[in-house]
Amino acid sequence: MAVKTSKDQDPSPALLDAVGEIMRLYKSLPSRPSIEEVEAAISVIKTVNSEEQAKLDDISDQDSPQDVPQELFSLLQQARKTALLFQSREQRKEALYVVEVDKLFETFDGLIQKASLLVSGDSREKAVSINESVDQIQKESVVTDESLITKRKDGESKKDSFKGLAKSSSSKAAFFSGEVKTEKLSLMKVAAIIENSAKTGAVVLDLRGKLMDQIEWLPLSIGKLSAITELDLSENQIMALPSNINNLKALKKLDVHSNQLINLPESFGELINLTDLDLHANRLRLLPASFGKLTNLENLDLASNQFTKLPDTIGSLTRLKLLNVETNELEELPHTIGSCTSLVELTLDFNQLRALPEAIGNLACLEILTLHYNRIRGLPTTMGHLSNLRELDLSFNELESIPENLCFAENLKKLNVANNFADLKALPRNIGNLELLEELDISDDQIRVLPDSFRLLLQLRVFRADETPLEVPPRQVTALGAQVTFDEQLWLTIH
């Protein structure tokens, strides 16, 4: 039964004491999580649950090794599952606490509302007063990104480590540079940052090296970052990107280098506005079939992965200017590479390539081609079509000859064919056509005689021939050191 008070009668001291105690109890509660923090916690729980189930299924699908009894292997599987459940529980712990606290606050809200009705009776004046007091307490207790400020003893304020990780379109401040040491972020904090970034419309998010080592995946809420144009997730331990990353429609620059990525989701190809993608230093073996849809890509770094081949769809990347695939296990290039007609720089060092496709000659814009430490024995005759080629590095291969057609690449300035050891025995007879050549390295080859046209290389400034058994020009000339500078007069004297 409601306790009614007369409009003309003051409330009793006992009633005031009861109301006062309710308010004191409310004030004594810990800070209430913000809406964004609750949403972040829910996202974390969903993410952990999803990943947990996927990993449990993977463990169940494992086959027993030949020399391990099935019963013992079953025990091993149970041990793996138990360890996984323990890990998942730890990852959910912080998020579950936030959700439970929010539920307790909802319970207290209900109690406040009921007390308000009991006190007000027929009048709403006191009810409004109580509710206003509660609202004020809530505003003071809610923790948001803007309120994450720690007061120092001297009265100054110190911004929380969350600040600076994201930058909105209206922000003029530079986003986090990665140089300042900050505390590593838990999955819950990462989710909170994502929620806040989504709410504020942030366009840049820098989480480079910020995630705790235990974090192997990102919260599913990352799909909310529809306004993000630059995302840096590099130097963490991420093993997989969520499939809903395709929701980042505005994304132009994505840096995920130095993680533990094993594959990319098939939806990755829907990031059609990407212009810069850095995936180097991961564990990738294949690219998804949808990768060819990334037709706006200009810079692509796939170095230091485990690729044995590139997909034919690479040829769809017609705007690609820089492609780095060094330090992989590539055995061949797809012929479709010739369709990447905007390529300016192609880096293929430290692979297992034995040859280049004829289509390489279609790369009319190519200026730099590096192939050192491969197993290349010969070059396609179309190399001469590379009219803009300025630098060519073929050192540490198994080259047996250099095609005469290369001498039609008349803009070549640097040519390195060193360390082909017993295989390379001669330079092209028409090497003198490379009139702009400034640097030439034939060290550790088996070249004994330089062609007559060599004298026409009037721009040559650096010539290296260490451990090469040259007979013409005389040994005493090449013995001047690792770097010999020639000018036109010197060559006229030699000949």
Image (cartoon, grey):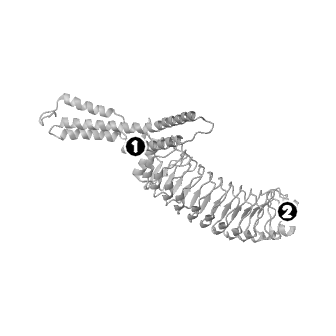
Viewer-closest of 196 and 405:
405
Which mark, by number, is residue 448? Answer: 2
Helix, strand or loop under label 2:
loop
Work out which residue is located at the far top of the displayed protein and give it. Answer: 14
Residue 162 visible in rendering: no
Q: Amino acid at mark 2?
A: Arg
N-terminal label among 2 and 1:
1
Q: Quadrant of the C terminus?
A: bottom right
Looking at the image, residue 437 lies above or below residue 101: below
Q: Quadrant of residue 313?
A: bottom right
Instruction: Please tell me which residue is depicted at 25% across the width and 41% down the height of the picture.
Output: 132
Residue 392, percent from left and from top = 70, 62
Helix, strand or loop under label 1:
helix
Q: Residues within 10 Å of mark 1 (few under 14, many from 20)?
A: many
Looking at the image, residue 355 lies above or below residue 20: below
Residue 381, percent from left and from top = 71, 69
Residue 304, percent from left and from top = 63, 51
Q: Residues within 10 Å of mark 2 (few under 14, many from 20)?
A: some
Q: Which residue is the site of mark 1?
A: 42
